[in-house]
Image (spheres, rainbow, N blue to C red):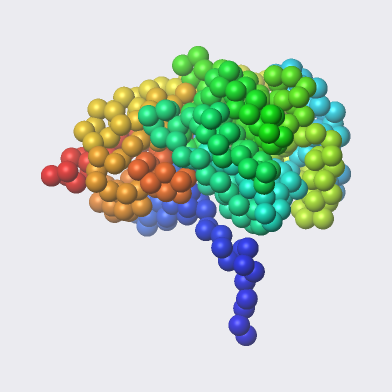
Amino acid sequence: MEYRISKRVASLTPSLTLSIDAKAKQMKADGVDVIGFGAGEPDFDTPQHIKDAAAKALADGFTKYTPASGTPQLRQAIADKFKRENGLDYTPAQIIVSCGGKHSCYNVITATCQADDEVIIPAPYWLSYPEMVKLAGATPVILETSDVTAFKVTPSQVRAAITPRTRLFILNSPSNPTGTVYTPSEIRALADVCIEKGVLIMSDEIYEKLLYDGATHQSVASFGPVYKDHTVIVHGFAKAWSMTGWRLGFLAAPLPIAKAIDALQSHSTSNPTSFAQVGAVAALQGPQDHLPLWLAEFDKRRQYACERLNAIPGMSCCVAKGAFYLFPNISGSGMKSTLFCDQLLEQAKVAAVPGIAFGADDYIRLSYATSMRNIEEGVNRIERFMRESAA
Ligand SMILES: *Cc1c(COP(=O)(O)O)cnc(C)c1O
């Protein structure tokens, strides 16, 4: 039997962040002393009250189908969150709960993009965006940025990239992989171009709360009704509540888009896990006192790692103001990112993700969602590796 894989799926590249992480974990299991900077998830446990709420729901028998787009309680709690924290009025019908923020992105792109459409994606980008666009049959249009401008795309770049076929502009602030945070006025200026040209914005705000150095987040939808009408917000529980394995994300959209996604989800995954949704209500409505503790810890690691990396000859690193990633420039090593990361893992036993996965081959991504001890040892190893490869 000759198996034919569909063109759309055959063209996919498996997620490099997930595979590097798996390789490092395997080496560790084999007894190799690896320092892993590959993690795309917080190294803290889900807060106890969230686990308790889900465990109780499970014990109480809340184990059946829920409405495809989420329980009324959770969709209301999410609408309340947008009102309370972002000043945004959404009805529960405009909120869709999905199986992770990644699934929310997939739903938005699938529901709004088709063949002959173009989707503008600033690079470095979260690696799944272009693949999802290709799966929808549409074409990713990548806008290059560099560390010289802190990886920020400009309104004139976006304007120049828009054609009559442009359907969607993808914004991700704070950013994975760079940690870049756009200021509110920068976000507004980008949105103004999209509104003028009638382009929808998908704003991935999953790192909304992970901010340092006094940086602020303002949702693109919150600048006024016309901004809200041009925006779908994507969000999730994975990062700020450390719930990556729960697979719970959500989105807020103009009603026609929310209805389309409701139909799509009703025929694909149906509802996200019933008792996990009860945990998510507790995440939104319960105490948030874990967050300042996590942020203080992340911030300490961020400052330390950034300073150390910038002191290494041949390496430079933007001071990222959000998320939990650093994206140092490795062009001084004379290597491109895949070779650099292969050698770094082989020789120095440090796992990092090659920037090429995010559309930026002169950089690597280091996650500081790991202990300070690992960061100290890992940076020592990177320093030695750079010295030895220069020699
Ligand atoms: C982690 C992440 C998500 C969502 O992750 P899920 O685990 O699917 O909730 C979405 N966007 C970005 C940029 C991320 O880094």
Image-based side of 86 in relation to 325, left or right:
right
Q: Position of residue 375 (x, y in %)?
A: 35, 33
Image quarter in which the C terminus is found: top left
Left or right position of 104 against 338: right
Q: Residue at x 67, y 44 (%)?
A: 164
Figure quadrant of the N terminus: bottom right
Residue 99, x across and y down, in percent = 70, 46
Residue drawn at the location 41% of the way across and 35% of the way down: 146
Query: Residue extending furthest bottom?
Result: 1
Residue appearing at x 47%, y 45% in the figure: 358
The image shows residue 81, relative to residue 57, as above or below, that is: above
> Looking at the image, which is closer to me, 244 or 340?
340
Relative to the observer, which residue lies in front, 63 or 113? 113
Tell me, yes or no, if residue 49 can be seen here: no
Can residue 185 be seen by looking at this rendering? yes
> Residue at left 31%, top 24%?
307
Of residue 8 and residue 159, the one placed in the foreground of this image is 159
Quadrant of the rendered image containing residue 166: top right
Q: Can you give x and y, in whole percent of width and height, for residue 305 in the image?
A: 35, 29
Horizontal relation, residue 175 to residue 229: left or right = left
